[in-house]
Amino acid sequence: MRKMYLSAPLPFVGQKRMFAREFIKVLEQFNDKTVFVDLFGGSGLLSHITKCQRPDATVVYNDFDGYRERLQAIPQTNILLADFRRLAAGVPKDKPIRGAVRERILERIAMAEREWGYVDYITVSSALMFSMKYATSLEAMRKETLYNNIRKTDYPPCPDYLDGLTITSCDYKELYEKYKDVPGVVFFVDPPYLSTEVGTYKMYWRLSDYLDVLNVLRDKPFVYFTSNKSSIIELCEWLGENKTLGNPFKNCGKVEFNAHMNYSAKYTDIMLYKKQDEKPFNKAA
């Protein structure tokens, strides 16, 4: 019998493992539906669970972030982790890795990239970095403090994790357009965090991007994920109560000023302005 995962087999920021059991209950509300499209597939956990629960249905997984490649690289990743354990044997758990040990670990990663042509930097980051920080290249990892968070066991192979899924890799809007008129379709909508550079999603996600996603919810069955950090529900409730406002900043002038709090923290101050509407010039006055 096929194993059903309730958490993704490899680290991924934003995977919905805490929702897994409740998500299974929600799927029961769509027993009459036959096509499920995971627009922001991420780790594939929602798609995997859906296919396990509904083997009769078509489940489309949008692997925009290359999770398949990471799964295929598990044997090589385990080799790296074994070498990390050996190299960092004298470093206490959760403590910084410094000096010669740090350099040997970084060189081992560089050698792996030269030899294999690929390194799963997300999984490597979870072993060598703290606080949900992820590097996507050796250059980025060199800038970070490394820690001994190396797991003691290998990642088990999971060759059937994505079995049965229809897998694609494209912009979510393109995928939505392809399936929006398909009978019996349900969309899973789990967009990236608002206004953040997400290491496991390859774009900067602005407010306008986040609001654009709401278009796919219109008149379609869906399962949507968000958080209180985005305030998106509160915003939509406010817009629903103020339908006639329009855009108060339309035709405004804008001035921007780039400011720095310190060497790594910066922001942009914005000033918007609009002159009062002028009355038409009356020559007879």
Image: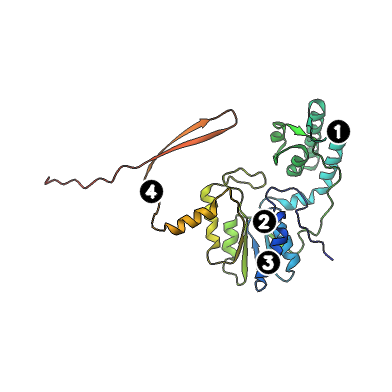
What is the number of the mark on residue 41? 2
Provide the residue designation for mark 1. Answer: 87
Which residue lies under the disc numbered 3? 27
Question: Which numbered dot is residue 251?
Answer: none
Residue at the image position 57 percent from the left and 28 percent from the top = 262
Whole-Å distance between the Cαs marked 4 and 2? 35 Å
| Secondary structure of the residue carrying numbered label 1 | helix
| Residue 44 coordinates in the image, percent (x, y) | 71, 56
Give how far across and how far down residue 154 sits, in percent. 85, 46
Q: CA distance from mark 1 to mark 2?
A: 35 Å
The kind of residue tagged 4 is Lys
Instruction: Tell me if label 3 and label 2 are in contact, CB under 8 Å.
Output: no
Quadrant for the N terminus in the image:
bottom right
Q: Is residue 84 above or below residue 284?
A: above
- Residue projecting furthest to the top: 99
- Quarter of the rendering containing residue 283: top left
Please identify the quarter of the rendering in which residue 153 is found: top right
- Of residues 45 and 130, the one nearer the viewer is 130
**Amino acid found under the numbered disc labelled 3:** Leu
Q: Is residue 241 visible?
A: yes
Question: Dot 2 lies on which element?
Answer: loop
Q: Which is in the foreground here, disc 3 or disc 1?
A: 3
Q: Give me the C-alpha separation between circle 3 and circle 2.
A: 16 Å
Q: Secondary structure at mark 3?
A: helix
Q: CA distance from mark 3 to mark 4?
A: 42 Å
Amino acid residing under circle 1: Leu
Provide the secondary structure element on which disc 4 rests: loop
Q: Disc 4 marks which residue?
A: 250
- x, y percentage for residue 224? 61, 59
Q: Nearer the viewer, residue 93 or 203?
A: 93
Give the quarter of the figure containing the C terminus: top left
Q: What kind of residue is marked 2?
A: Gly
